[in-house]
Amino acid sequence: MRMPRFFAAPLLLACTLAPATQAAERPEVTAAGKAVRDAVVAWRRDFHQHPELSNREQRTAAQVAQALRKMGLKPRTGIANHGVVAIIEGGKPGPKIALRADMDALPVTEQTNLPFASKVTTTFNGQTTGVMHACGHDAHTGILLGIAQALVGMKKDLPGQVMLVFQPSEEGAPTGEEGGASLMLKQGLFKDFKPDAMFGLHVFSTLPVGTVGVRSGPLMAASDKFTIKVKGRQTHGSRPWGGIDPVAAAADIVGSAQTVISRRTDIARHPAVVSFGSIHGGIRYNIIPDEVELVGTIRTFDEAMRKKIHADLANVATHVAAAHGATADAQVPDSPGNPVTVNDPALTQRMRASLEAVVGSERVIEPPLQMGAEDFSYYAKEVPAMFYFVGATAPGIDPVAAPSNHSPKFTLDETSLDIGVRTLLQVALDYLHGGNAPAGASGG
């Protein structure tokens, strides 16, 4: 899996033609945004100051459940370890929708100097590290709580039902554990409540605050994690011929693996990436070790290409290691990955007007394909879904140069919280009331 989820490559802003008439923001959305603004900021800052890693979101889940109970809801807890789910029953018949926020943080030591910066430390993969909401999940959780409060306040006149999904472990469960969207579905998230549509958002550093990015069809890449263990024979560094050097073999594998994309993959059809993110081997400067471990990620948009890259990378690792007299145990992938995140084309076309109603048509852009991955993709395989980006970088700062999601310096402009609340609430209400339906289609 799965890290880093996002990268700081520029989003190409697509030109959009303003329609002759543009839908207006619902008055109840405007009012709700103002009413919950301070609470959303407070929730977000609390979660930011108390981050928890994937499958460890015990305090976060407890705070979410407590807030929902204060709203009069009856949350279900413990799904997929620390997931929290609640249903808002509207006072009128109508469709079913689900809204999702992820709750987990990352093993990143914060470097923002915010007054509510995280001071939390933990042990991750045998190393001491800080813990930080470097991807913005604290914002997502605060936004969905604000939307929950708004919807509860108008549920008498609300058509249909809304499932609130506070999801753990989006960043990927620790080795040997299950978690995230796939486990929530496995444990029956949609068993008794299968939504007609599902929506989610993500704050995004490479968009300026006030803008929204949405794309029909494929949006974010499939992601797979791989592990390659290169095994040699330990010897003294002064006498390399006395053993088999896995460090030299591993270095050769890293270099040769780049040809899997540049020479073996038709990237004119779809983009793809193979990246190494971790190399571990040896303990002393003058000892050639027995083993070196390489860990990395593969990103793809086509299933056939995905399988071919898996096979090609394993083939390269095995044969390059053999050329050095070493062996390679190539687990490609070494665990289930995320599918491509695909926005339902009809749903996205329908709901784009809802986003435009809040920020203006000129501020709703179509981003290029994103090599970051999202386990929201599992929900999108089950029901029509739409996932979109909310700009998070403050005015006056170049979004391309701003610290990206997953950076220890990632900083969220809190205006994006208000944009997130209002856009997702507008989308939810428009769908429930049957708005923005294509010609000839029935609402919901």
Image (cartoon, rainbow, N blue to C red):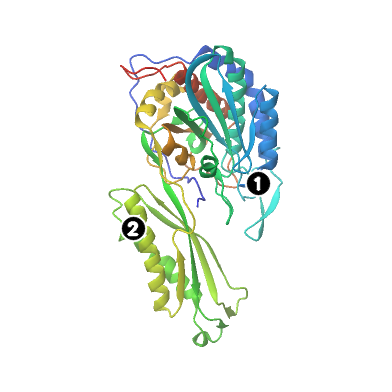
Residue density around tag 1, few if under 14, some if 14–19, many if 20 or more, within 10 Å: some
Circle 2 sits on which residue?
Answer: 308
Residue 302 drawn at (x, y percent): 34, 48
Looking at the rendered structure, the secondary structure element under dot 1 is loop
Front in this rendered view, residue 427 or 55: 55
* Dot placed on the residue nearer the N-terminal end, 1 or 2: 1
User: How busy is the neighbourhood of tag 2: few (under 14 within 10 Å), some, or many (20 plus)?
Assistant: some
Query: What is the x, y in percent for residue 37?
Result: 62, 23
Q: Quadrant of residue 86?
A: top right
- Residue 391's place in the image compared with 240, above or below, is above
Q: Position of residue 398 (x, y in %)?
A: 49, 38
Amino acid type, callout 2: Lys
Taking 16 as reference, is 291 above or below it?
Answer: below
- Say which residue appears at 36% left-offset and 56% top-offset: 307
Of residues 299 and 149, the one nearer the viewer is: 149
Q: Is residue 373 visible?
A: yes
Spot occupied by residue 192 in the image (x, y as percentages of width and height):
52, 31
Question: Type of residue at label 1?
Answer: Arg
Horizontal placement of 12 versus 278: left or right?
A: left
Position of residue 102 relative to residue 290, above or below, is above
Is 377 placed left or right of 137 in the picture?
A: left
* In-front residue for pair 116/321: 321
Q: What is the number of the mark on residue 27?
A: none
Determine the CA span between mark 1 and mark 2. Answer: 35 Å
Tell me which residue sits at (56%, 85%) in the image: 238
Location of the C terminus by quadrant is top left
159 is higher (above) or lower (below) than 339: above
Secondary structure of the residue carrying tag 2 is helix
Judged from this view, the residue extending furthest toward the front is 192
Query: Image point 41% across, 46% down: which residue?
Result: 221
Residue pointed to by mark 1: 56
Q: Are marks 1 and 2 in contact (CB under 8 Å)?
A: no
